[in-house]
């Protein structure tokens, strides 16, 4: 990790420059990687996440590997939900050391939590951010469930209380958000509050979660897609944002037993499925009218959609959902460099294909590998139960 001078941006290692130059050329030529057994791809992605954790000295998890300086500092928002993946993989693969890593990340999160219960992104200052706090809430709740250490439950309660406090007079998250505007993808934050409600039942958690879920449903168009779901108003949302919105509605619908949320999630996921090419590529951006707005793939979103379809398949047994999940993940696997000589690249999932695509360009963000592992674990379970 490169240090910064007092008045200059961090220097850039020549190794990332050479690496990403090579990757750009390969992707521009449309090269693909050989498909291996699913477990090989899964192991490679998990090994990369472990390296990302090691880069941050086993506190949080490094943001990822980038042209801008190689390995980057730990990223609070995604560390919160990556620790849930470490726990999940520890159980599925009988690797208790991953559970130890998860707890280390959880304790680091407690150490960087704001006094008001929120979580900030130091890049943007010290104020808490609604979405980031919601994602870290997932990790705190899971750490409490796994360890029964009250420090995690107390931290989770403080995060939940802050999320309730900063909702506007209608109960919607319009403040402490990017551009101070509401985002439909905060359905995932609503889901986090409902996870907190599972371990600490409180009407306020459910009330604020439902208000934001209802607002999201009201933003859904006839196309199945949502207004107000891009990072920046007016942009076409990435499949990453779209998947967040679907997943939050779907998981919340199951927790609450509310078919309205499930139906909304299914409409959007079905609309996205119709846009998948025969090779598995899904356009990286889709506007609210349902029109593809990009020719590249947001690989992160592809992994997330594979999770959505896999979970729908588990509920319905519909073969086309299983096939969609497999096809989307195979596309990602065909661009995962399991044997690359650079440990920052080896086994990781890029933000986009080509690697210079608009979503997280020229980087391997940690959450892309997190969602890949989650999707692969779901598909791995199919073969084990067959």
Image (cartoon, rainbow, N blue to C red):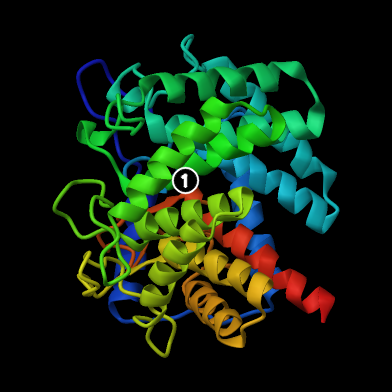
Residue 46 sits above or below residue 10 on the image: below
Is any part of residue 19 visible from this angle?
no
Residue 15 sits above or below residue 103 on the image: below
Residue at the spot of label 1: 188
Residue 366 left/right relative to 294: right
Measured as percent of width and height from the top left, residue 386 is found at 82, 82
Name the outermost residue toward the left. Answer: 234
Q: Nearer the viewer, residue 115 or 55?
A: 115
Residue at 20% x, 18% y is 7
Residue at 45% x, 68% y is 302
Q: Nearer the viewer, residue 13 or 368?
A: 368
- Quarter of the image with the N terminus in it: top left
Measured as percent of width and height from the top left, residue 69 is found at 36, 40
Number of disc labels: 1
Measured as percent of width and height from the top left, residue 109 is found at 57, 24
Helix, strand or loop at label 1? It is helix
Residue at 77% x, 78% y is 383
Residue 208 placement: quadrant: top left
């Amino acid at each position: 990790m490169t240090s910064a001078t007092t008045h200059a941006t961090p220097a850039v290692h020549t190794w990332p420059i050479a690496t990403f130059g090579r990757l750009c050329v390969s992707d521009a030529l449309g090269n693909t990687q050989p498909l291996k057994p699913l477990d090989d791809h899964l192991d490679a992605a998990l090994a990369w996440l472990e390296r990302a954790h090691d880069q941050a000295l086993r506190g949080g998890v490094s943001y990822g590997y980038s042209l801008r300086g190689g390995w980057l500092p730990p990223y609070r928002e995604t560390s919160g939900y990556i620790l849930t993946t470490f726990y999940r993989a520890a159980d599925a693969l009988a690797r208790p050391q991953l559970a130890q890593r998860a707890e280390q990340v959880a304790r680091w999160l407690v150490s960087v939590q704001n006094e008001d219960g929120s979580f900030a992104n130091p890049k943007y200052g010290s104020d808490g951010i609604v979405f980031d706090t919601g994602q870290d809430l997932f990790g705190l709740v899971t750490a409490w469930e796994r360890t029964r250490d009250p420090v995690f439950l107390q931290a989770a309660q403080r995060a939940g209380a802050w999320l309730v406090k900063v909702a506007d007079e209608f109960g919607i998250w319009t403040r402490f958000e990017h551009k101070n505007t509401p985002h439909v993808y905060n359905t995932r934050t609503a889901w986090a509050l409902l996870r907190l409600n599972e371990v600490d039942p409180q009407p306020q958690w459910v009330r604020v979660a439902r208000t934001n879920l209802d607002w999201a449903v009201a933003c859904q168009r006839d196309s199945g897609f949502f207004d107000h779901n891009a990072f920046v108003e007016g942009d076409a949302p990435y499949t990453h944002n779209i998947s967040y919105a679907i997943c939050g509605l779907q998981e919340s619908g199951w927790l609450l037993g509310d078919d309205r949320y499930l139906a909304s999630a299914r409409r959007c996921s079905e609309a996205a499925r119709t846009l998948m090419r025969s090779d598995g590529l899904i356009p990286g951006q889709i506007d609210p009218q349902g029109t593809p707005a990009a020719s590249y793939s947001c690989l992160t979103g592809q992994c997330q959609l594979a999770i959505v379809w896999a979970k729908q398949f588990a509920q319905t047994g519909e073969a086309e959902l299983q096939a969609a999940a497999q096809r989307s993940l195979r596309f990602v696997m065909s661009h995962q460099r399991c044997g690359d000589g650079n440990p920052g690249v080896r086994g990781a999932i890029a933000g986009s294909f080509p690697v210079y695509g608009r979503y997280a360009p020229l980087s391997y963000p940690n959450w892309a590998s997190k969602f890949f592992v989650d999707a692969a674990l779901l598909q791995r379970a199919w073969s084990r139960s067959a």
